[in-house]
Amino acid sequence: MPASHSVISSSGIAAASSKGDIRTLQERLHELLSRLADVTDVVKNWSEAADDSVHYRTTSKLIKHLQDTIKAIQRVEGVVKTDDILRKSLQDCSIPLDLLELMDYGSGLNPDCFSRELLREALGQLAGLKRRKLALERLGAAVEAGLKKREIEEQASSSQEVQSKKKTGGAK
């Protein structure tokens, strides 16, 4: 590895690059996020007016922002493609699907994914409680069987004692 490269780890994702490349990548990613936010704003604020001129202006604005977004993506690609170590590092890092789903909402957690995960967690806890209940029922049945067995053995031993006393008492 050249002296200008170093391995940087951020949240478990290792990226290798020079400080200048890292700064450039951060700037390009920031620019890309800004362009994506611009596109999102245009779509969110799309007018419901029936006037064709409003839709024409809004569509033109959206197309311009999409073109800017494409250029920003190409700039990020340019930085990643020029640094083999960074590209390999990004290809090797695994991003969990759950994280991508949670990020899939403009103003915070995706409510559908959050509720699904909450339901999955609740079902998992319920399954755990069912397993514990079953284990306690089995334990209770085993204890009850043990107590019955002990009671039977005590009755048998006490009846043997009574019989042995009768035999010893009757022999006197």
Image: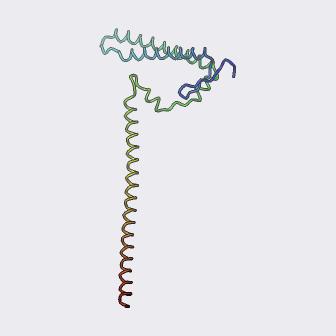
Q: Quadrant of the N terminus?
A: top right
Q: Residue furthest front?
A: 172
Q: Nearer the viewer, residue 165 or 80?
A: 165
Q: State the image quarter where residue 147 is shown.
A: bottom left
Q: What's the image's color scheme?
A: rainbow
Q: Position of residue 90 (x, y in %)?
A: 58, 26
Q: Name the residue rendered at 59%, 19% in the picture.
A: 80
Q: Measuring from the top left, give residue 92's x and y in whole percent.
A: 59, 29
Residue 142 position by quadrant: bottom left
Decide: is 153 above or below 129.
Answer: below
For this orientation, the residue located farthest to the bottom is: 171
Q: Does 94 sit above or below residue 68?
A: below
Extreme residue in the right direction: 2
Query: Residue 68, percent across and down?
Result: 48, 12
Q: How many numbered markers are drawn? A: 0
Give the residue at x 57% y 25%.
9
Residue at 40% from the left image edge and 58% from the top image edge: 139
Quadrant for the C terminus in the image: bottom left
Percent x, y of residue 47:
33, 14
Which quadrant would residue 38 be assigned to in this image?
top left
55 or 47: nearer the eye? 47
Q: Residue at x 37, y 41 (%)?
A: 122
